[in-house]
Image: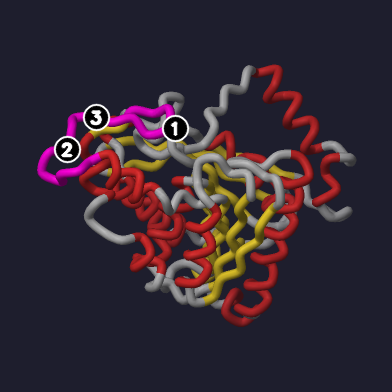
Amino acid sequence: MDKKLFLQPFVLFVLLMIFSSPIAGASAPENASSVITENRWLERDGQKIYGKLFLPEETDAPLPLVILSHGLGSDHRIMEPYAESFAENGFAAFVFDYIGGSEESMSDGNMTGMSVLTEAEDLSCILESFRSDSRFSEDEIFLFGGSQGGFISAYAAGKHPDEIAGLVLLYPAFNLQDICRKLVSDADEIPDSVVIGEHTVGSLYIRDMLTFDIYEVLRQYPGPVLLFHGTADPYVPLEYTQRAGQVLADARVVIIEGAEHGFDGEDRNRVEREAVAFVQEIIMEIGPDVRAAA
């Protein structure tokens, strides 16, 4: 569902320079911390998951943690600017590639063996790993996802409601189940593969997608949720996010006029600012006593 991200080294360098410059960095406070990164490998059922951890250079543990999920056919790089923004503001942030999540994934697997439920297992594995790491506050773990990554993050929060302090969802692809229903008229006759957007997925993807209702899962999460959606999104109609805002117990929907499926420029700066403020507000409500006991 995401626009495919093909970044040549020079283009990536230019983007990183832009987002670290004073002009484009207007969303970051003047006292933003320096950021360091660590490559990190995890394993689920014998398959490797690649990730990259962003950390503020100077801070005291345990740290609040934001786990960022990419969309269908994308990879960890699309979430790096958001992760860097969180780290500049004193949080740990983890980006990663889902197993079989895209053609460019650094993790194992392939897209025809992936489904939303296998990706949910990946995210559960990541949650378990970080919850046992003393560098991070287990009471201050947040999920952040775009498109299908938003779908997976919301699903994980519904399945692990006591483990997630808050959710930030960008143009979450809650329409995926309707897309799958239209592709398959008979659940007993699912083809070996189908094309969704520009990506070929296997029968497991369709089969798993038809086993639950994402909006019923959303009802199980009582925590705060911040949702962003553009009015010009060509892939996910705004109505799906608006419905999520009505179903969730504590949700705020931010509609960005003219934005498409993926945020750039000032739209992305705005999302970074508001997402950081949202997480900071939740941490203040959690309180220092809970954090000190983590």
Q: Position of residue 79 (x, y in %)?
A: 59, 41
Rate crowding at label 3 as few (under 14), some (14 to 19) or many (20 or more) other CA atoms within 10 Å.
Answer: some
Q: Earlier in the sequence, mark 2 or mark 1?
A: 1
Q: Residue at x 62, y 40 (%)?
A: 80
Residue at the spot of label 3: 193
Q: Are the residues at dot 3 and dot 2 in contact (C-beta closer than 8 Å)?
A: no
* Numbered disc 1: secondary structure: loop
Tell whether 152 sits left or right of 88: left
Please report the bounds of the magenta region as a residue range: 184-200
Q: Which residue is mark 1?
A: 73
- Mark 1 vs mark 3, foreground winner is 3
* Residues packed near mark 1 inside 10 Å, few (<14), some (14 to 19) or many (20 plus): many
The location of residue 197, given as percent across then percent down, is 42, 32
Within-10-Å neighbours for mark 2: few <14, some 14–19, many 20+: some
Task: Give how far apart the Cα atoms at labels 1 and 3 are.
Answer: 15 Å
Q: Which residue is mark 2?
A: 190
Q: Quadrant of residue 213?
A: bottom left
Dominant secondary structure of the magenta stretch?
A: loop
